[in-house]
Image (spheres, grey):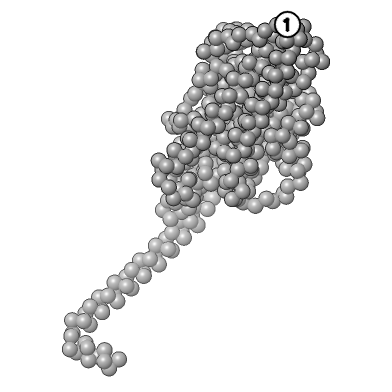
Amino acid sequence: MKKMREMLSEKPWLGWVLFFATLAAVFLIALFASTVVERRSEAVLALQVVREIPRWEPRNEVWGENFPRQYESYRRTADTAFRSEHGGSAERDYLSENPRLVVLWAGYSFSKDYHQGRGHFHAVTDIRQTLRTGPATPGTCWTCKSTDVPRLIDGMGAAEFYRTPWMELGSRVTHPIGCQDCHDPATLRLRITRPALIEALNGAGVAEDPGHQEMRSLVCAQCHAEYYFRGDGDHLTFPWGHGITVEAMEAYYDATEFADWTHALSRAPMLKSQHPDYELYRTGVHASRGVSCADCHMPYRSEGGVKFTDHHVQSPLNNIANSCQVCHRESEDRLRRDVVERQDRVLQLRTLVEEALVRAHLEARAAREAGASEDEMAPVLRLIRHAQWRWDWVASANSLGFHSPVEAPRVLGTAIQKAQEARVLLAALFGRHGVVPPPLPDLSTKERAQAFIGLDMEAAREAKPDFLRGAAAGWRDGPPEGDKPERPR
């Protein structure tokens, strides 16, 4: 201390330096403390409910009064401008891009109309517009399209909801996918609102409280999973009785002798896969590392010191900085290139399966017309069924295989094998019955492919009621009287 006083007496300016340095340090510490307090206050305010939300409130804007950041990000799902090499939210006519699909689904409604999903915001409009829905469609098809569904299932019961005609429920289902589907309004915790997933998890012996991180995938699995309509009541069911792999679900369907439809050309009993995104993701490296669906498709954001989940559900390729680069340190261009390269390889394999399957369906029809018996055709049709199921299990899932870039090619490889085995058996039948394989028709456009399988598309469009082709019909400001949740004053 004595030495310090001597230094200050010799150099008085040094004292002033120390004085101002101390003042600056105190000021910065005070500023930092003030910022921390302010940000903590913002975080507390962000969790405060401005107005109580009714139990089954379907209107996303009502939730938005309490959670404006989340709601404003959710509203961006209305944007359909983004188009990646193989996906995105922009409208795409898959049948026009790949007319082989028309033949693969001959006799099934997907051969009429199959478009890229434009995102959660447009779910109700898109299902009304598609040619795949109409008077014969069961109410089950509304299950994953609207925040109105949990309220209706709660009031009607799941069984009654499923068996009610789709058109009869239409005036009561208008709000697109949103807050109600995944959140409990009382606790704001993630919850499962669709009975089919609860039934599947209970059957698999999964714990009732799987934890928050796992829930960030399970709320997606409510809809982004393989399912079928069981029995005369069209009960929505996940075929997880033997497991969630492609082989396990195939065994489940075979054991129950279930078929979605009989193929119009080959007469094979077919299975139509319904976007098994969750099951395919579970076989991938991201799932094994504990990365959830939301980590990539709804990454966290920070705004004004508040950390929240970005509810603009979209392709990670449109938000690489907040999704991929949280873990991967490569550049955006490199990461995008890696994704597309893997998708391109999956597409190459997928195309090989499609080409083999188209020929197998045509050759099966020719063999039957040449006099092949049902006993002769049975092993052929079984191979076609299994090959197309495995192809569709990958093809119908979003991401073109990237959710599991090792499992997807493996499954497509087994599909190629089974399709070719079917064609080998068919070649033997042709030799036995003295016929030659049929030539491949002109399938260069969707229209030519639809004409080849005998579809009258003009009649199909005329059969679609005008009000179903438009945007959501009926009420917009809330459900009809009697359905409205009581809103606290």
Whether residue 473 appears in this view of the structure is no
Kind of element beneath mark 1:
loop
Quick check: 273 above or below 14? above
Q: Residues within 10 Å of mark 1 (few under 14, many from 20)?
A: few
Asked if residue 245 shows in the view, the reply is yes
Quarter of the image for residue 3 reads bottom left
- Judging by the rendered image, the residue that carries numbered circle 1 is 434
Tell me the residue at 45%/42% (across/down).
Answer: 335
Task: Please report the residue visible at 68 percent of the width from the left and 18 percent of the height from the top.
Answer: 423
Residue shown at 57%/11% (left/top)?
449
> Which residue occupies the foreground of this view, 454 or 489?
454
Task: Locate residue 275, reporting x and y percent.
Answer: 62, 31
Q: From what the image shows, is residue 13 above or below residue 351?
A: below
Is 22 displayed left or right of 226 in the figure? Answer: left
Front residue of 234/489: it is 234
Instruction: State the quadrant of the N terminus.
Output: bottom left
Residue found farthest to the bottom: 2
Residue 356 x, y percent position in the rendering: 62, 20
Q: What type is the residue that disc 1 sits on?
A: Gly
- Residue 226, percent from left and from top: 67, 33
Give the number of callouts.
Answer: 1
**Image quadrant where one finds the C terminus:** top right
Give 381 or 10, whichever is nearer the viewer. Answer: 381
Residue 377, compared with residue 489, is above or below; it is: above
Q: Position of residue 298 (x, y in %)?
A: 51, 43
Q: Tell me which corner region of the image, top left, top right, bottom left or bottom right, holds residue 352.
A: top right
